[in-house]
Amino acid sequence: MRVRVTPGAKKEKFLKITQGEYEISVREKAERNMANRRVCYLISQEFKVLRGAVRIVNGHRSGVKLIRIEKI
């Protein structure tokens, strides 16, 4: 899935744009991988999977990320 991330937001939000494309705002800053970890946590909560099943495939340092949910 493709995710557009906004770090350092005042409110967290998880918004579905189209099939397979989401917009996520997190309160954590884009420092020390904190925003990426929070994004993975929110995705795992939304899709009811384990946190370890959510991986960032591409875009670790970008605002647009490619995420994969794996079966464990």
Image (tube, rainbow, N blue to C red):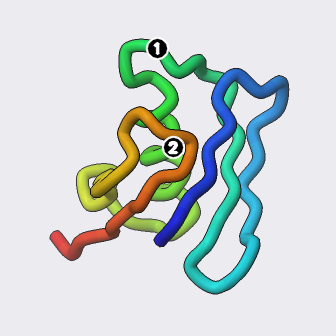
Report the quarter where the C terminus lies.
bottom left
Other residues around mark 2 within 10 Å, as few (<14) / some (14–19) / many (≥20): many
Pick whichever of labels 1 and 2 is earlier in the sequence: 1
Look at 57% across and 63% down and name the residue there: 46
Q: Are marks 1 and 2 in contact (CB under 8 Å)?
A: no
Q: Is residue 47 left or right of residue 27?
A: left
Q: Residue 22: give its label.
A: none
Q: In this view, does 49 lie above or below 13?
A: below
Find residue 28 and report its image quarter. Answer: top right
Mark 1 highlights which residue?
A: 31
Q: Give the x, y percent position of residue 16.
A: 73, 70
The amino acid type, in three-letter code, at marker 1 is Glu
Q: Is residue 55 left or right of residue 65?
A: left
Look at 33% across and 69% down and name the residue there: 69
Give the camera-side residue of 47 and 36. 36
Mark 2 highlights which residue?
A: 39
Instruction: For mark 1, give the secondary structure.
Output: loop
